Amino acid sequence: MPKHTVLIAGPTASGKTGLALKIAARNGGIIINADALQVYTKWRVLTARPTGAEMARAPHHLYGHVNEVQDYSVGRWIKEVSDLLNETEQSAIIIGGTGLYFAALLNGLSSIPPISAEIRSSGNEHREREGLAWFLEKLSQNDPETLLKLDQNNPARLQRAWEVLEATGRGLSYWHARPTRPTINIEETVPILLNWQVNDLNSRINTRFDNMIKSGAIEECETAKVAGFNAKLPANRAIGAKEIIDALDGKIAMQDAVIKSQTLTHQFAKRQRTWFRSKMKHWQHIEMSDAPDLDAIVSTLPR
């Protein structure tokens, strides 16, 4: 097991990678991904995976190791993280913006039976045809307890709740109430949450997306388009993928695709912040700025 574990959570574009690399430079150790989209091989640019130069500065794990057509779940992520933690004596830095991954890591994972490919495909079709309203209606009628606890603007969460109900006959609230075992105890970690003022973070998001365009996001989308883009695959939910491909198909102007992608990322970051405020109240909250003193932050952490 690691000497100690640092957890770094924060909304998209909040500077998690830079802080993780600073910690690794001082303490050594491995960096483990906790972002649900960065696990996939494709979309290196659009998911803001660490660059090759960044990954060369410290050992990185669970980045870009899953083919787009493979099913990938929080359960598989927990298994892979557990294996990594059991195999290393180095410090571990677990970094990402997927709150559900951190919740499962620290609270345990509900023993929800597997969801069949047929039900998942049906959920994807309903999401494509009817959108949020269909899931809201079904959950309101059949699982209102779970619905009250969900972000009702999050299509993935609503679809997942419907799939579990359809597959098991019981709602997510039932499964979440069952006893679970954490992978690690939060008392054995240094849990850090990066906070930003909304306007400052949105400005960073806009700048980062502009830089993504300069760094090959359009070419990345052209490659995906030629290979056959399937918007229903979880791997293809990277913000900007559908928007840029729509522009390549002549459906919208490329500049409109960029603006739409930036706006969607603002909305995604808002959902992340809401989740973090609710679930990570007892983490060490660090207020960030446009020129954060990462060395000062790192100096407060144990070696």
Image (tube, grey):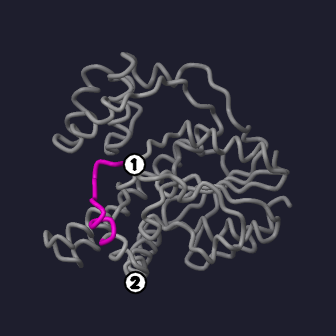
Q: Residue at x 21, y 37 (%)?
A: 126
Asked whether, in this view, residue 118 is left or right of residue 2, the answer is: left
Q: Position of residue 173 (x, y in %)?
A: 45, 23
Disc with the residue nearer the chain's start (1 vs 2): 1
Vertical order, 287 against 154 (above or below): below
Q: Which residues are magenta?
A: 222-233
Which residue type does callout 1 highlight?
Val
Q: Residue furthest left?
A: 251
Q: Residue furthest front?
A: 227
Reading the image, the residue beneath label 1 is 69
Which residue type does callout 2 highlight?
Lys
Reading the image, the residue beneath label 2 is 214
Q: Dividing the picture into quarters, in which one does residue 162 lie?
A: top left
Q: Position of residue 58 (x, y in %)?
A: 72, 68
Disc 1 element? loop
Q: Dividing the picture into quarters, in which one does residue 32 lie?
A: bottom right
Can residue 20 be found in the magenta stretch?
no
Q: Position of residue 1 (x, y in %)?
A: 82, 44
Q: Residue at x 34, y 49 (%)?
A: 233
* Other residues around mark 2 within 10 Å, as few (<14) / some (14–19) / many (≥20): few
The answer to whether marks 1 and 2 mark residues whose Cβ atoms lie closer than 8 Å is no
Q: Residue at x 41, y 32 (%)?
A: 149
- Quadrant of the drawing holding the C terminus: bottom right
Vertical order, 296 against 153 (above or below): below
* Other residues around mark 1 within 10 Å, as few (<14) / some (14–19) / many (≥20): few
Q: Residue at x 22, y 39 (%)?
A: 125
Instruction: Find residue 192 and name its label.
Output: none
Q: Position of residue 280 (x, y in %)?
A: 59, 45
Q: Nearer the viewer, residue 2 or 186?
A: 2
